[in-house]
Amino acid sequence: RFRGWTIFVTGGAGFIGSAVVRHLLQDTHARVVNIDKLTYAANLESLPGTAGNMNYFFEKQCICDGLGLRRLFEKYQPDAVMNLAAESHVDRSIDGPAEFIQTNVVGTFTILQEALRHWRSLSGEKRKHFRFLHISTDEVFGSLGDEGFFTETTAYAPNSPYSASKASSDHLVRAWHHTYELPTLVTNCSNNYGPYHFPEKLIPHMIIRGLAGESLPVYGDGKNIRDWLYVEDHAKALSLVLERGSIGETYNIGGRNERTNLHVVERICDLLDEISPNPSGSHRNLINFVPDRPGHDRRYAIDASKLERELGWRAEEDFETGIYKTVRWYVDHQPWWRAIANRGYTAKRIGLNR
Ligand code: NAD
């Protein structure tokens, strides 16, 4: 797959971007150019084995800088762009939304413009197969009640600065296709989890604090529901959509793994009890309910049947096996997360006392 293709992966040093880069390098013949500004969320240590790989290139570059991007389009002449660069943490978007508007909205606009300029400069086969895949979230659809699923035709109703900025970027991508005919694809995915996840996010946050014997803060009543997808399943879905998706279409990606936040935290506690027992008793005793996040969406659930039906995709990892692998990974890779968990703002957010 992707023999002779050069693929730009923006945000390739982040959680999902690094999984995409690892997948493309391991399972396809693509030449991969990782374009990343290296914000707090980036970690080149999430890309083991890339040093010396002839198919891998790294460019430190902000997607809001049009001239810098133009230089890269001219240098590498890519066949495809996978746009994952984004500010992605909802709590941070509440504390400081400006960066989210800048990267997620202005950055997407800027890379669309440069991709369009590049696409227009192409001819023949290369012009025919060029595609721009924009990676987005199910949070653009807002919150669900107890029943129903988000489909590709669900109306957008974003509730947080993060989801509003991602919704804006999705609309820009749609407009660049309809107005300028840029060959675009959009995916909206549910919550991801797995190895190399930034320590502030719910699952790693709980594992790390649990390992340290610290309290485990659960928002509100813990009954908020998320649909969890193992990150490697997401990476495979994205390369499938890039390869075989129909231009101009949107695909929902989800794992059919709805769980309440409390259930997720309790599973982590039970696995920690098995893998790394706490001498002072069960990790469940550390659970501590804290005031809810403002505007906290109650339930997200994705209907991924279009992707399953049209492209034959299936999530391979069940939540129970995926969460086991994830807890095991954090227990076995403490240097990876300790290096980040001890840094400034993150250290404050994770709040480890030792
Ligand atoms: P992340 O925060 O882990 O990584 C984002 C990466 O983008 C980082 O490496 C960062 O340095 C880079 N970046 C940020 N601003 C940049 C800029 N201006 N220019 C260049 N690079 C920049 O995020 P993630 O969780 O890997 O998410 C990747 C994408 O997938 C995002 O678009 C997000 O909205 C989407 N998404 C995430 C989830 C999830 O559960 N994490 C679910 C669905 C969709």
Image (cartoon, rainbow, N blue to C red):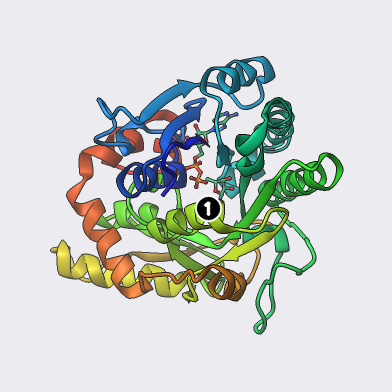
Residue that carries the numbered disc 1 in the rendered image: 243
Q: Position of residue 289 (x, y in %)?
A: 48, 66
For image coordinates 50% across by 76% down, the residue present is 256
Left-right relation of 219 to 54: right
Left-right relation of 79 to 70: left
For image coordinates 60% across by 35% down, the residue present is 126
Residues 107 and 197: in front is 107
Q: Amino acid at mark 1?
A: Glu
Whether 318 is drawn above or below 199: the answer is: below
Q: Quadrant of residue 305?
A: bottom right
Q: Is mark 1 within 8 Å of ligand 1?
A: no
Q: Is residue 52 visible?
A: yes
Residues 168 and 172: in front is 172
Q: Quadrant of residue 346?
A: top left
Residues 204 and 119: in front is 119
- Point out the image quarter for the C terminus: top left
